[in-house]
Amino acid sequence: MSETKKILVAVGTRPEAIKMAPVILALRRQSWASVTVLATAQHRQMLDQVMAAFGIDADIDLNLMRPNQSLPELTSRILLGMDEVLRENSYDAVLVQGDTTTVMGVALSAFYRNIPVGHVEAGLRTGDIRNPFPEEMNRVVAGRLSKWHFAPTRSASDNLLREGFPAESVHVTGNTVIDALKAVASRDLDVGVPLPADKRLVLVTSHRRENFGEPLRRICHAVRELVERHEDIHVLFPVHPNPNVTATVEEILGGNPGVTLTQPLDYLPFVAAMKASYLILSDSGGVQEEAPALGKPVLVLRRETERPEAVAEGVAALVGPDSEAIVRQAGRLLTDPAAYAQMARGASPYGDGHASERIVRILGADLQAA
Ligand code: UD1
Ligand code: UDP
């Protein structure tokens, strides 16, 4: 019988937990794997929301979130907290997902303790080290520190091969976000927020650091103009709790009868909201991947994207945080059925729903051969 391998799976923020949940559940089904789930809790409430949705409890919780935390303080707390964990326990591998400060800090901590790292959603790049900030640098650093690169798409894998990573360390698996979505999307889900039944729903999210300040103000002004121009739409905007986001959104959109502002939705109600929506406006990475899989056109509120596949397929469009462009492009989709149908075709360039199985199979084969 093969020896049990000890895997530490780290999650810090909402998107990491959503995308790592299928991997954790798949690993738990393996007889060769002993899984420890570690929450840095870089996010507190939003991480807990997702863990509860997937029925996953953290075995170790560093409980690191502080109000309006800065990158240096968060990074230091992650490094110190992780080192204590890694000093006291031995692991055969550490898994991280994505491009947050948790990912960079946990991968660096594992490197200091000489533990091999597997990077889920590896190889995404804009090519501009300051954009998105700090995520592009986080994923470059995590990549350098990793032994296994689980790339969601061929183009992500090509980025890694171009950077010189050995081909045998790079695996195209699909994105686990589609595994998570497929596990729930066919259920009868409820948004759980009262919304006018006679209006088309436009779902909006925004939280990127590059959009703080003036760009987010322009996004909010565009939303206000859209509801003024199109009386048959209603906007649902679950507001990210980062204080840089809430203050601006409340100031410009608070009290507007055409806009419902809510706390972040739990994952299942948020999937329900995506399914119920006519159109999605978002600067989120995960939402850019989910919307096409649900056949919903998504206007990306950023100037560049590390997820070019949906734009190339014509089911997502980059509009940037620019009021005029948002109002024009959203307006076209709201009034031109042919343009809408073209973008609402549905496509799933990010995966087939089996990414986590592939990741677990590759990891298991490698660790057991060692
Ligand atoms: C972080 C990630 C970003 C990711 C996003 C997903 C970094 C630097 N940023 O951005 O890449 O796209 O998460 O949502 O890793 N807060 C709460 N409750 C929560 C979560 C956040 O109150 O559950 C507030 C706190 O005041 C916290 C602040 O938001 O200090 C910022 O959280 P942080 O994780 O540092 O940055 P995000 O903007 O959430
Ligand atoms: N999401 C959610 N509730 C919300 C908004 C988003 O559950 O109110 C989910 C969404 O389905 C996606 C993920 O959160 O899977 C995206 O997280 P976020 O936008 O915070 O981060 P990013 O993907 O940009 O890093």
Image (cartoon, helix red, strand yellow):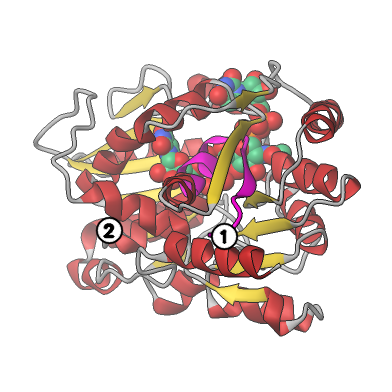
Disc 2: which residue: 294
Secondary element type, mark 2: loop
Q: Position of residue 361 (x, y in %)?
A: 50, 67
Q: Quadrant of residue 316?
A: bottom left
Left or right, 299 with reference to 347: right
Graded by Cα atoms within 10 Å as few (under 14), some (14 to 19) or many (20 or more), the crowding at tag 2 reads: some
Along the line of sight, which residue is nearer the eye, 329 or 211? 211
Q: Does any portion of residue 282 appear in the rendered image? A: yes
In the displayed structure image, the side of residue 324 where residue 159 appears, left or right: right
Give the extent of the magenta segment: 1-20
Amino acid type, residue under disc 1 in the picture: Ser
Q: Position of residue 210 (x, y in %)?
A: 69, 45
Q: Which mark is residue 295?
A: none
Seen as rendered, the residue at the extreme front is 1
Q: Would you say residue 16 sits in the magenta stretch?
A: yes
User: Which residue is disc 1 drawn over?
Assistant: 2
Q: Quadrant of ligand 1?
A: top right
- Membership of 158 in magenta stretch: no
